[in-house]
């Protein structure tokens, strides 16, 4: 009964919000400050007491601190490559429950989403595809996959590193369900989980979004013990209902616990939890078989193109452990560990949907029942410290680490069936798709072990800072299905130079690299089936300027990434081979700006210019050509107006320029048109029964724009999500 009363009161308060918000703004004094300041209803969690306020840039959406690999947290101005650290406040401001992190990451102009499907975690950074494999959890790699991402409601901070950076982060692996691996060339995203702060937290949130998806969140945090050295933070979620796309549903339930200890000479953090995630529908991948200069006009994003029985169910457990022990004022030891297990199955159509110049579907497909599970484990032991040689201050770290992954999978394809229809009228799957194939018992597919040693030293003298780092990695990968074994030994260097002419300005140069194992050709349509391709190395060179002043943090970077390529080739007899040859070259200019530009105005965003081209292609026939699905221009501008302590308004504009994909059309290419989307929102703080109540109303893709979404390096593409409303109400007890 009490819950029903609370829900009714929340809805009543929402109705009153629109009528009272204007009045509240008018009651502010001429200086712009409210006549009666409203107390803070929830204090942000802190990692180190007394540091948070100084670390947040004006507006609180980004932090000036980020993880610099095995060296731990560092000032962003001291890191010789592009970094952006998004806070929990940014996640709360822009997180759409259907794709929470994907929406938040769009605040970085180098990151673009490539799918509207909540079944996958795909997006791109600087034009190169990424997914959950590229996330780290509290500094521990390989805890997520293409199908899984960190839950947004447990995140305190996301440290986004642009470009390859294996040398500073230690060894990792892909475990994305393939044996090709996921190259770390685009970058990494380190997630720092919420921890108990100085003030207790007891917070209940209700979220309503889409076509009836109702979510409930619980957040409880306390500190206890002598000097409050122990802390726990409990986060739980339950969401069930329809997404904005007709026919798409989601059911998500999870619970996570973070326990930390702060001793006089040590810090320890344990994060553990259980998650269960099920999605019905919302898988929309397309390919183009036409010859037009431009893709046909995007159809209504409310149209469903799913195979009717499409669904995905994944569940599992996760654990990370971080410990640091101070041995002396100049020497520390640290230990990081992680373990994750996931299981599940899915039913979908076996391939992307293919349509012609007129938008007609004219191809065949089949249903696919897939059962899979995986385990990942990680151990790292290291030593860090500092010393001086003359005027030079050294901060150094050495670590050894080991990561292991095991993967089981069994797919069962149904009968080949026809599908037909038109983009604008809908799609029909013919009876040949039925009956659906049965789920088969999973079988071992591959396992992988990586062992590495990493060293890092940052040397500071006056206004100069030099960073040197390297990782030696031994990789053992075994494809259990075809008995192919891949062994690699490689050394990955990183170096950087930073000059700080003033305390809030940094000019830097950085070189970073990453390594990806050789691909095993498994498709029998290739003449070289069973061949193990050579491993590939990605490199990035970057120069830039960082500036932080009066609550505004700005970074301007110029970069070049060389990424080895894999593509189809044919010999003189017409036989097709899958080859590791040539490369994609990404040259770009990136500008980001985050913080306050006026007392009541906060901005986040920037722009990216990207010249992505192919080089050393077969016989040079496509040298200088575009990289499939990669746009030259991308920009985002998010604005928050804080009218007073109670009322704030926010808006965000996303623009992505046109891109191209290979086709049989004129000049061998077809254009993916540019698009612009707008997100709008309002937040209001009030009280109910003397309890702080925060209300939020957001509208994503407010003008219901329909558009195609390119996928970096691929000829497949996705269709946008329709306009999505989200209302949330949070009460602090």
Image (tube, rainbow, N blue to C red):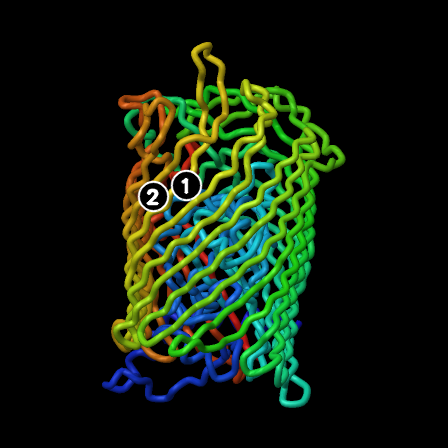
Nearer-the-camera pick, 435 or 514: 514
First in sequence: mark 2 vs mark 1: 1
Residue 676 in view: yes
Query: How busy is the neighbourhood of tag 2: few (under 14 within 10 Å), some, or many (20 plus)?
Result: many
Question: Quick check: 595 above or below 405?
Answer: below
Where residue 393 appears, as percent x and y from the top left, is 42, 76
Question: Quick check: 17 above or below 317?
Answer: below
Q: Are marks 2 and 1 in contact (CB under 8 Å)?
A: yes
Residue found at x 51% / y 47%: 131
Where residue 134 appears, as percent x and y from the top left, is 52, 51
Query: How busy is the neighbourhood of tag 1: few (under 14 within 10 Å), some, or many (20 plus)?
Result: many
Circle 1 sits on which residue?
A: 563
Find numbered disc 1 in the image and state the secondary structure of the residue it sits on. strand
Find numbered disc 2 in the image and state the secondary structure of the residue it sits on. strand
The numbered disc on residue 272 is: none
Residue found at x 43% / y 57%: 161
The numbered disc on residue 586 is: 2
Nearer-the-camera pick, 191 or 546: 546
Question: Quick check: 200 above or below 606?
Answer: below
């Amino acid at each position: 009964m009490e819950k029903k009363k609370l829900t009714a009161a929340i809805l009543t308060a929402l109705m009153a919000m629109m009528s009272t918000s204007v009045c509240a703004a008018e009651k502010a004094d001429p200086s712009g400050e409210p006549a009666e300041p409203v107390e803070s209803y929830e204090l942000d969690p802190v990692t180190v007491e007394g540091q948070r306020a100084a670390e947040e840039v004006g507006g609180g959406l980004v932090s000036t601190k980020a993880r610099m690999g095995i060296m731990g947290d560092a000032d962003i101005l001291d890191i010789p490559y592009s970094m952006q650290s998004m806070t929990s406040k940014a996640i709360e401001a822009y997180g759409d429950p259907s794709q929470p992190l994907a929406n938040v990451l769009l605040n970085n102009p180098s990151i673009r989403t490539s799918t509207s499907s909540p079944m996958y975690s795909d997006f791109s950074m600087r034009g190169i595809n990424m997914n959950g494999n590229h996330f780290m959890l509290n500094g521990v790699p390989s805890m997520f996959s293409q199908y899984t991402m960190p839950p947004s409601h447990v995140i305190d901070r996301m440290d986004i590193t642009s470009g390859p950076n294996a040398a500073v982060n230690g060894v990792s692996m892909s475990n994305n369900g393939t044996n090709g691996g996921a190259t770390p060339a685009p970058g990494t995203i380190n997630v720092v989980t919420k921890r108990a702060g100085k003030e207790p937290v007891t917070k209940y949130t209700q979220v309503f979004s889409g076509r009836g998806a109702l979510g409930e969140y619980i957040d409880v945090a306390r500190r206890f013990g002598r000097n409050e050295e122990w802390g726990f933070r409990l986060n739980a979620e339950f969401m069930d209902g329809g997404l904005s796309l007709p026919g798409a549903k989601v059911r998500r339930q999870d619970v996570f616990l973070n326990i930390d200890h702060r001793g006089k000479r040590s810090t320890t953090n344990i994060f553990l939890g259980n998650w269960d995630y099920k999605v019905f529908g919302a898988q929309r991948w397309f390919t183009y078989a036409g010859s037009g200069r431009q893709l046909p006009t995007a159809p209504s994003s409310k149209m469903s193109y799913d195979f009717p029985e499409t669904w995905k169910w994944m569940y599992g457990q996760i654990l990370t452990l971080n410990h640091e022990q101070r041995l002396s004022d100049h020497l520390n030891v640290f230990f990081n560990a992680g373990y994750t297990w996931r299981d599940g199955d899915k039913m979908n159509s076996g391939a992307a949907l293919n349509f012609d110049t007129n938008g007609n579907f004219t191809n065949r497909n089949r249903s696919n029942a897939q059962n899979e599970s995986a385990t990942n484990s990680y151990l790292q032991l290291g030593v860090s410290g500092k010393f001086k040689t003359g005027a030079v201050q050294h901060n150094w770290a050495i670590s050894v680490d080991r990561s292991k992954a095991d993967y089981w999978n069994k797919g069962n394809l149904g009968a080949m069936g026809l599908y037909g229809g038109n983009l604008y009228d809908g799609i029909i799957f013919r009876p040949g798709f039925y009956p659906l194939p049965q789920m088969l018992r999973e079988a071992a597919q591959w396992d992988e072990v990586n062992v590495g040693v990493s060293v890092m030293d940052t040397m500071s003298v006056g206004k100069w800072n030099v960073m040197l780092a390297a990782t030696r990695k031994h990789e053992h990968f075994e494809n259990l299905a075809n008995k192919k074994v891949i062994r690699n030994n490689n050394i990955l260097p990183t170096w950087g130079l930073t000059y700080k002419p003033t305390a809030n300005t940094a000019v830097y140069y950085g070189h970073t690299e990453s390594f990806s194992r050789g691909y095993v050709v498994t498709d029998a349509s290739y003449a070289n089936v069973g061949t193990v391709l050579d491993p590939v190395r990605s490199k990035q060179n970057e120069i830039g300027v960082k500036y932080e002043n009066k609550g505004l943090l700005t970074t301007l970077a110029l970069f070049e990434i060389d990424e080895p390529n894999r593509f189809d080739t044919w010999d003189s007899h017409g036989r097709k081979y899958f080859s590791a040859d040539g490369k994609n070259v990404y040259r770009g200019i990136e500008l980001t700006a985050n913080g306050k530009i006026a007392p009541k105005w906060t901005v986040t965003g920037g722009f990216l210019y990207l010249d992505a081209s192919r080089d050393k292609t077969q016989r040079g026939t496509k040298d200088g050509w575009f990289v499939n699905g990669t746009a030259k221009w991308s920009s985002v501008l998010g604005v928050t107006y804080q009218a007073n302590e109670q009322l704030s308004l926010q808006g965000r504009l996303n623009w992505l320029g046109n891109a191209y994909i290979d086709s049989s059309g004129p000049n061998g290419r077809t254009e993916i048109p540019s698009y612009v989307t707008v997100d709008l929102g309002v937040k209001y703080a009030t009280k109910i029964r003397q309890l702080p109540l925060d209300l939020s109303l957001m509208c994503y893709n407010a003008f219901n724009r329909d558009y195609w979404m390119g996928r970096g390096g691929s000829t497949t593409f996705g269709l946008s999500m329709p306009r999505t409303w989200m209302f949330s109400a949070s009460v602090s007890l």
